[in-house]
Amino acid sequence: ELSVLCDAEVALIIFSNHGRLSEFCSSSSMMKTLERYHKCSYNATEDIIPSKETENSYHEYLKLKTRVDYLQRSQRNLLGEDLGPLSTKELEQLENQLEISLKHIRSTKTQLMLDELSDLKGKEHMLQDANQLLRRKSWKNCSRDSGPSMPSDCQPARPERFFQPLACDSSLQIGFHPVGIDQLNNGVSPQNGDDYAPAWM
């Protein structure tokens, strides 16, 4: 009656309490009706799913677009551009952000300079050690080649004396006649033609 009144294709499947199967189909084949039902139902579901995915993708796109616009505006503000629309509070926040960024940059720069200085000191110590090693090898080679006597080029340079002995003529004495060593030993005093006059007169 339903199929006649509605001009529709009707299929009915009934299972009794005892497991007995009863079915009715207004068309010629129950299988064809089931295939048609399956096709219509799953095709409708497949059509609905893409529409939901498209909607979700569109919302995600709007979120990303808003985020990108915000980041671009923030970048321009950090560069000192487009500051007119900002309020006093927003300008203070921007200033604090710049100060924090500058502190971080300076701290990083200082740390890099300290690391470079440490590396240079390490290289300096390595060069000093290598220089001392070369000096030791040079002394050993000089000692081996020269034997017990060290050559002049391997001997350390002696410092020149600051004070030099003054050469003086002992005969240049005012009013004094030179006396020989033999005369002093013999107890003979030189006389100047006068027995009573001393030698210095």
Image (tube, rainbow, N blue to C red):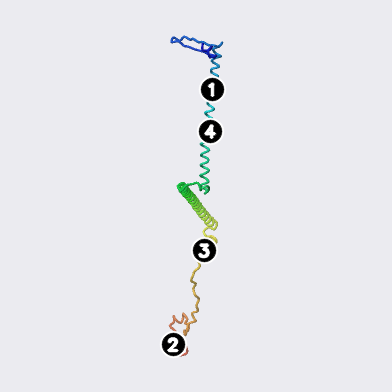
Determine whether the residue tagged by mark 4 lies in a helix, strand or loop.
Answer: helix
CB under 8 Å between callouts 2 and 4? no
Residue farthest to the front, as pictured: 5
Q: Which mark is residue 198?
A: 2
Among numbered discs 2 and 4, the one appearing first in the sequence: 4
Question: Which residue is painted at 47% across and 88% down in the image?
Answer: 192
Q: Which three-letter amino acid code belongs to the residue tagged 3?
A: Ala
Q: Which three-letter amino acid code belongs to the residue tagged 2?
A: Pro
Q: Which three-letter amino acid code belongs to the residue tagged 1?
A: Ala
Residue identified by numbered label 4? 58
Among numbered discs 3 and 4, the one appearing first in the sequence: 4
CB under 8 Å between callouts 1 and 3? no
How dense is the environment of label 4, judged by Cα within 10 Å: few (below 14), some, or many (20 and up)? few
- Separation of disc 2 and disc 1 at Cα? 156 Å
Q: Residue 131, position in %: x, y?
A: 52, 54
Q: Nearer the viewer, residue 156 or 13?
A: 13
Determine whether the residue tagged by mark 3 lies in a helix, strand or loop.
Answer: loop
Determine whether the residue tagged by mark 2 lies in a helix, strand or loop.
Answer: loop
